[in-house]
Image (spheres, helix red, strand yellow):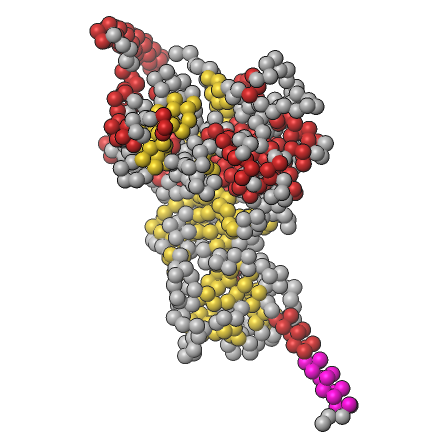
Amino acid sequence: MLNKKQSICITIILNSCILFSNMYTSSAVDTIRANQTITDGNTIVSAGRKFELGFFSPGSSTNRYLGIWYMMSKSTLVWVANRETPLNNTSGVVMFNSKGSMVVTSSDGKILWTSVSRKSAIESPVVQLLDDGNLVLRDAVDRDSENYLWQSFDYPVDTQLPGMKFGVDLVNGIDRCLTPWRSVDDPAPGNFTHKMDTNGFPQLLLWKGPVLWARAGPWVGLWFSGNSKTKMFGFYVDEFVFNEKEIYFRYELADDNTPISRYVLNPDGESTIMIWSHRNQDWVVYTTLHMDKCDLYGFCGAYGGCNPNNYPRCECLKGFVPKYSEKWKAGAYSDGCVRRSPMSCGGRESFVKFSGVKLPDTRISWYDLSMNLDECESLCLKNCSCTAYTNADIREGGSGCILWFGELMDIKYYTDGEDIYVKMSSDFDFGMESKSSRVTKAIVIVLAILATALLFLLLHLLRMRIQKKRGRIKFNSEMVALNKIEGEDFKVPLFDFTEIANATNNFSDLNKLGEGGFGPVYKGLLTDGQAIAVKRLAKDSRQGVDEFMNEVSCIAKLQHRNLVSLLGCCVDKGERMLIYEYLPNRCLDSCIFDEEASRSMDWPKRYNIINGIARGLLYLHQDSKLRIIHRDLKTSNVLLDQEMNPKISDFGMARSFGGNQTQANTTRVVGTYGYMPPEYAIDGIFSTKSDVYSFGVLVIEIVSGKKNRSFIHSDHSLNLLGHAWRSYKEDKLLGLLDEAILESCNHVEVFRVIQIGLLCVQQHPVDRPCMSHVVLMLSSNIALPHPKQPGFFMERTFHDPDSSSNQLTITVLEPR
């Protein structure tokens, strides 16, 4: 038996041991110290519980690797140590060796991976996992120093995290580049390498094995040339460091409200920027840097410019002609172009300015960051080998100088592109034409006009003859246009009339899903069991052959989970029919504006629909191969699938933008009152911001369960947007909400969504956010600006109480 004094001593010793153990565990949770190990099944976690280090098996593989992943998304790996030397069992151990390096070993003592330090050893080394995802080897005494002996950020895998440097350490010879996983089951290096190239003016290159696959272009002060959409719209702080010691790019989170993000190089060489959605607890694609033919290195050869929105995509720069014209006509562009007039050094050479381009390959270039543009031009003129020049930095009017020597390779036209000045020979004058040339051109124009007039006259006579003979009007050009669907440009499956008639029970009224200005829509069932929706254009439809062709050409090239899928079309027997995937929940307006159906539309469903529409529009505006403006976005043009996921439909009025085009004018204003912004309805000016306005209207309608134009309030005569604006200003947003969502919504969240909707419907287009910004605001908690007054904010006078409920669709035809 212990006496009282002995018991007290033992109690004190045990409590001290427990306290010491707790202190040690607390301080060591993110750290591996000397003589400590991590075995498979155990992990260390960063102090803020943001990242975790341990052994894992990727995908369906049973191999084991040491890696770092997010605590919030444990399947999202950001770094792998032994990516080329996996373990085939769970015997892996992480420890320090006698040289102060971290090593991964197997049960038999085989070293699978070790950290290689280029710095001298320190007395008390520890390995620590930081809250930014960086694994560092540092001095245990000096916790705040960034003088690391080794760090995982110097050896990235496929992911760039905020704060991580992407580029070259010239002093220590470290090349921080990205290499994707081989597959989702294998983190071994894939075929691609994305790296900073320092030959000439620094630029980003993507290699596929030994082949230069693609090029992002040099940093021009705001972004990498050719990739302006990687700019994070002010929510992230970009930094490009270029000095004698380091050349690198990195980005930081602007503040605690900025959404978590990561930049990932995928196994197919495609790059994606992902942001974390706290609501969905999942990653959302912020933007994808698509690889089309114009992104393939040198696709158009030397002095060839590639435009992804044109066909053919390649064209020689002005003053140049194809090197081999026959091969060029056949679509083989890699030999590029040559000067129309050869250079002769010492003559009166001049420069031609090309705007909106991705700057050419800078590996054979010279630069001086202190020179201005005039000095740059003068220097290029004096050097016979110099072929072009431009500013190295486009900010504040431009500064610095880049000179190119030799051929200009890999030029691409894109929105927000830069200017470049290309040297031309003295005998090639872009501004002057000889008198004989002008006379010849005038004669050619007159003859062309006469020939055209004669052709139209003959066509008119032929048309009248056919009308008289057959007793009906049949405009030949329509049939020619419809027959083009069979060409390679569309690649749309064609159905014959009999097949569609059988599928719809001969277009029975029992199969009719609805009817619009274009004609009826029928549900059908193909012989293979697939359900379809058939949009059959009526003979007197307001949607003519142009709109029909436009919808086929647009939607056939678009693939996104929030866009309706076109299965094919039918132009048999004079019909114009579009065959879509069948969506059982029909359109959005039938769900939110119907009193009974809206009761099942709780807030999570509506929020999912809002996010889906936003992502669909983002794809149309930014991530598709064409920049598509929908121009008729409304609730009846949003369809819902089995899981109530939204799909944007009806592209008959859509327009595509190319090159640097961001807006256009038209005398043919198409769309629906209540969804059109002022600048479009009044002046015919449309842009991506027109769709943003329509999206904002949709958001307010989805939240309130009321239609914008048919909304009536006892206290005023404002439309729904005006009521929402007044409610926001008076802090009475609760009264705006649909009663069906009151119990299922978080008031803070739904009020935030209303504010986003009001930002989208502001009077002036420049004040409205772009869709990438909208997606970011919806999926994060970043601070929102206060909206300004919406467009069409005015009192209404109702002459007929029922007239306000009509959804009028306007079409002002262009003169022909």
Residue 595, by quadrant, is top right
* Relative vertical location of residue 582 with respect to residue 251 in this rendering, above or below: above
- Residue in view at x 51 percent, y 19 percent: 808
Task: Name the outermost residue toward the left.
Answer: 469
- Residue 221 appearing in the image: no
* Front residue (pair 815, 616): 616
State which quarter of the image contains the N terminus.
bottom right
Residue 13 located within the stretch drawn in magenta: yes
Task: Name the outermost residue toward the bottom.
Answer: 1
State which quarter of the image contains the C terminus.
top left
Q: In the image, residue 328 lies at what x, y percent?
A: 27, 33
* Front residue (pair 563, 642): 642
Residue 612 located within the stretch drawn in magenta: no
Magenta stretch? 4-17
- Residue in view at x 64 percent, y 15 percent: 797
Residue 434, by quadrant, is top left
- Residue in view at x 62 percent, y 45 percent: 781
Q: How many labels does the image show?
A: 0
- Residue 587 appearing in the image: yes
Q: In the image, residue 174 lies at what x, y percent?
A: 48, 60
**Relative side of 109 to 221, left or right:** left
- Residue in view at x 42 percent, y 37 percent: 584
* Front residue (pair 306, 301): 306
**Relative side of 602 to 415, left or right:** right
* Front residue (pair 624, 493): 493
Q: In the image, residue 680 lies at what x, y percent?
A: 53, 21
Q: In the image, residue 266 lies at what x, y percent?
A: 42, 51
Report the magenta stretch's main SS.
Answer: helix
